[in-house]
Image (spheres, grey):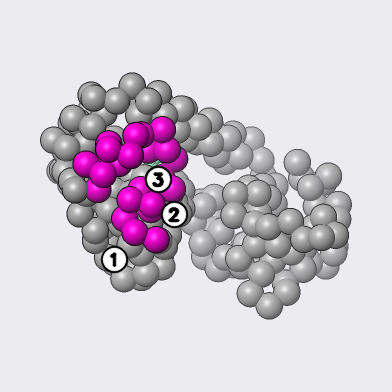
Amino acid sequence: MDERELLRTVPLFSELSDADIASLGQLAAPRRYPKDTVVFFENEEGDFFFMILQGRIKVTILGDDGREIILSVLGPGDFFGEMALLDNEPRSATAIAVEDSELLSLHRTDFQSVIADNRSIQAALIKILTARLRRANHQISTLALLDVYGRVARVILDMAREEGRRLKDGRIAFRRPTHQEIANRIGTTRETVTRMIKDLERQALVRMEGREIVLQPGFEKVFD
Ligand code: CMP
């Protein structure tokens, strides 16, 4: 796929005319970030907006004690880095490539003029930011209202729905996250997650199949 076709896959730009996509393609610069490299740190000044063409970017907040809380893991078609450009505040979180990633970056002034010139982008941006707020609210309720067992189950269900695929028999399979990754999404320890997952396996609610976790029939009923 060439850059223009790739830009079309970014939902924020799906309504743009061919001419607008072409001029956006001229303004956007491709950037590669190998696995485990930092795109930017929380609290830095930020001048770029990023779109993800390939790979996955973890949005995370690091505590002083080295613990981290993962706010989101974004993938192809998603964007990030808009907040610092919209409110002129520092970066609200750190962005790290968790896979080899290909991004397109847009400088602040270009981002601002693209938004100012396109009503369809303004509407799409508001819609996507609203969806992020809904997701964040869901995350807050998970953290505040569920015990740790419920949180592990809830995060597994959310990940399965966000990135999994339905098998023919109706079960959902998805990439097996590390126990540390699950722990960092819900503010607990890796050991606790390991214990909870063993328990879910014992109850035949999840099954490890190769590099995937498969939610067994009943999982959604019990934890939804
Ligand atoms: P910015 O503050 O510039 O830098 C960090 C970026 O992470 C931020 O812009 C958003 O693009 C993204 N981000 C922050 N919080 C969330 C969240 N809760 N869900 C998804 N993305 C987020």
**Residue 204 placement: quadrant:** bottom right
**Could you tell me which secondary element the residue under label 3 belongs to?**
helix
**Beta carbon at label 2 within 8 Å of ligand 1:** no
Residue 128 % position (x, y): 45, 33
Q: Which residue is mark 1?
A: 33
Q: Is residue 77 above or below residue 14?
A: below
Query: Which callout, 1 or 3, points to the residue nearer the camera?
Result: 3
- Name above or below for residue 135 compared with residue 32: above
Q: CA distance from mark 1 to mark 3?
A: 21 Å
Which amino acid does the dot numbered 2 rest on? Answer: Pro
Q: CA distance from mark 3 to mark 2?
A: 11 Å
Q: Would you call the spot at circle 1 few (<14 residues within 10 Å), some (14-19), or many (20 or more)?
A: some
Q: Residues within 10 Å of mark 3 (few under 14, many from 20)?
A: some
Three-letter amino acid code at the position of disc 1: Tyr
Q: Residue at x 37, y 38 (%)?
A: 13
Q: Is residue 75 left or right of residue 112?
A: right
Tag 3 near tag 2, CB within 8 Å: no
Residue visible at 83% across and 67% down in the picture: 202
Measuring from the top left, give residue 180's x and y in whole percent.
52, 65
Quadrant the C terminus occupies = top right
The mark that comes first in sequence, 2 or 1, is 1
Amino acid beneath label 3: Arg
Q: Determine if the magenta segment contains residue 7.
A: yes
Mark positioned earlier in the residue sequence (3 or 2) = 3
Q: Main secondary structure of the magenta part?
A: helix
Q: Which residues are magenta?
A: 1-25
Mark 3 or 2: the one toward you:
3
- Badge 2 marks a residue whose secondary structure is loop
Residue receiving disc 3: 8
